[in-house]
Image: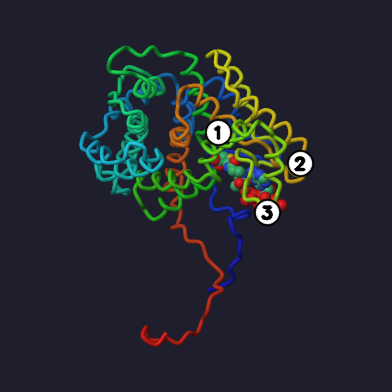
Amino acid sequence: SGYVTLDSGYKNTGATKSAITFLDGEQGILKYRGYPIEELAEKSSFLEIAYLLIYGTLPTQNELDNFQYQISRHTLVHEDMKKFFDGFPSHSHPMGQLCSLVCSLSAFYPESLNVHAGKEEENTTILKLLAKMPTVVSWIYKKGIGHPIIYPQNDLDYVSNFLNMTFGQRTEKYVIDPVVVSAMNKLLILHADHEQNCSTSTVRIVGSSDCNLYASISAGISALWGPLHGGANQAVIEMLEKIKNDGGDVDKWVAKAKDKNDSFRLMGFGHRVYKNFDPRAKIIKKACDDILEKLGINDPVLEIAKKLEEVALSDPYFADRKLYPNVDFYSGIIYRALGFPTEMFTVLFALGRLPGWIAQWKEMRENKEPIGRPRQIYVGEVNQEFVEISKR
Ligand code: CMC
């Protein structure tokens, strides 16, 4: 009943009030809880940012140590979960595995189902999810390469433990490279929240039905998978590879992206909210040069990416539509330099976005938001006569 405003894709509709992330798309400004992303990416660790997003303030050293300790108590994942994990084909897409595994945590940790249990219970579920996500992600990586999983090592910090479970071997000690740890922290921080994007809105809307945290986040992971959202990081590298194998003719591919009869889009370009440089892309581009140099890697697709950016930015098609490189444009080149296969990229995005999703789910509950339920404008038939199937 009443008047319904149509806003396809929610381009102008605010769905919530939020105090987590500030974004000014015209100016290209991004802040978590009021702190500029540039400073956070430079000076903090991912766990510190997770604390900031979820609890609202930067932790003291004591608070951070305690947070790390609490998380380390939950890094193991129920052994029985491995039984169903073993059933995935070894080359099934990591994102398909991730959303199923995260949702299944609600079956293995059923205390999460009662979302009215209380603040302490809610916080334990949050800590469990933060703790188990890196473990599960490392399982997926190990399956992809046919190696046995590595158990968590709780004396390591959050990111180092993840790297150890991922790249460590049972046969020898994994030497953790500080360059890799710092790059990983930076990438995860840059992905940690981005206000009401497709996956975050999904988490909030699913959670608004009093659905448990694991299932709500699993829905967000599914939303992230699409190539118009987080799946773009995989699509970017695949596109750059294609351009390279096609002879590196960047102009030809830019022309293809402009052609309205061609469904091809420049992956890693454009954004619903940024009509200026995506500040995350600026940081990642610089980090990309830095990290590849430090690791002594020369990746030919980096040159193609830079050329593509230059050609696109000087083209009126992209200028008129204010299409700039986004967070996904250079991130894959770093992930690849760190040793991750392309199909894992969106999983890494999910690992980074996890604290943001949790913070948004928690805020939605604290705000006591009503169940999300958009309206529609019905354009179908209204008066049809039913005809028996034998007479149709
Ligand atoms: N290549 C070529 N043309 C584009 C592109 C692109 N990447 N992005 C937008 N356009 C054009 C689009 O065709 C339209 O042109 P016209 O006005 O002539 O019809 C105009 O720009 C506006 O685009 P839109 O699709 O209406 O914009 P949107 O806000 O609905 O979509 C987007 C935003 C991110 C889905 C889109 O820019 C896109 O598909 N980009 C490529 C995929 C990508 O990189 N996604 C990652 C987004 S950032 C991080 C994340 O969310 O994970």
Residue at x 68%, y 44% (from the top left corner): 256
Q: Which residue is mark 3?
A: 261
Residue at x 57%, y 36% (from the top left corner): 236
Q: State the image quarter where residue 378 is shown.
A: bottom right
Residue 299 in picture, x, y percent from top left: 57, 22
Q: In this rendering, does residue 272 appear at all? A: no
Q: In this rendering, does residue 210 appear at all? A: yes
The answer to whether residue 235 is left or right of residue 67 is right
Measure the C-alpha gap from mark 2 to mark 3: 20 Å
Q: Decide which of tag 1 and tag 2 comes sooner along the chain.
A: 1
Q: Identify the disc placed on residue 223.
A: none
Q: Secondary structure at mark 3?
A: loop
User: In the image, what residue type sits under mark 1?
Assistant: Ile
User: In the image, what residue type sits under mark 3?
Assistant: Asn
Q: Identify the disc placed on residue 237.
A: 1
Residue 257 in picture, x, y percent from top left: 67, 44
User: In the image, what residue type sits under mark 2?
Assistant: Ala
Q: Decide which of tag 3 and tag 1 comes sooner along the chain.
A: 1
Q: Cβ of disc 3 within 8 Å of ligand 1?
A: no
Q: Callout 3: few (<14), some (14-19), or many (20+) C-alpha neighbours within 10 Å?
A: few
Mark nearest the camera among 1 and 2 is 1
Q: Callout 1: few (<14), some (14-19), or many (20+) C-alpha neighbours within 10 Å?
A: many
Residue 333 in picture, x, y percent from top left: 55, 27
Q: Quadrant of the C terminus?
A: bottom left
Residue at x 54%, y 67% (from the top left corner): 376
Q: Identify the disc placed on residue 319.
A: 2
